[in-house]
Amino acid sequence: MTKGERIKQLREASNMTQEELAKRLNTTKQTISKYEKGIVTNIPSDRIESMALILNTTPEYILGWENEQQKNSGIITDTAVSEKQKMQRNSVILQAEYHASR
């Protein structure tokens, strides 16, 4: 499965349109479409991380580095993750939620 196919599968499993995902990532529907179709393959790492958080998976799954979708539920609480990483990821979640509410 390609990166774009994984993004589309995750988006659809989240009952989210391309437009909704784009809004949460502060980009356009056309950009999401290009990601899903494989037209744009060099997706910035910060966007991959934000997308993973929004779609409840890991960047590694989106990139095809792991086969299992590791879903989390919102705010990260795993003790194996450093406090700094938790704060950074939670910040991304809050920013995405803010942009989605605009």
Image (spheres, helix red, strand yellow):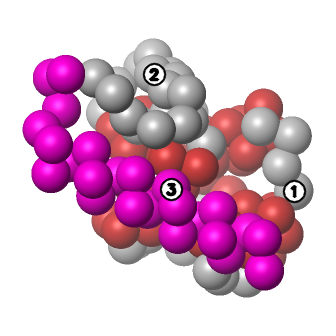
Q: Is residue 18 above or below residue 90?
A: below
Q: Quadrant of residue 42?
A: bottom left
Let me know if residue 81 appears in the view. Answer: yes
Disc 3 marks which residue? 93
Count how many numbered circles sit on residues in the image. 3
Q: Position of residue 102 (x, y in %)?
A: 78, 80
Let me know if residue 37 appears in the view. Answer: no
Q: Position of residue 83 (x, y in %)?
A: 15, 43
Disc 1 marks which residue? 17
Disc 2 marks which residue? 70
Q: Are marks 1 and 2 in contact (CB under 8 Å)?
A: no
Q: Quadrant of residue 68?
A: top left
Q: Earlier in the sequence, mark 3 or mark 2?
A: 2
Q: Which residues are magenta?
A: 79-102
Q: Quadrant of the N terminus?
A: top right
Q: Looking at numbered disc 3 in the image, what kind of residue is underneath it?
A: Ile
Near mark 1 (Cα within 10 A), the count class, few <14, some 14-19 or many ≥20, is some
Query: What kind of secondary structure does the magenta stretch mostly adopt?
Result: helix
Q: Looking at numbered disc 2 in the image, what kind of residue is underneath it?
A: Gln
Near mark 3 (Cα within 10 A), the count class, few <14, some 14-19 or many ≥20, is many
Residue 63 magenta: no
Q: CA distance from mark 1 to mark 2?
A: 21 Å
Task: Please tell me whether mark 2 sits on a helix, a strand or a loop.
Answer: loop
> Which residue is drawn at the image coordinates 49% and 46% (left, top)?
52
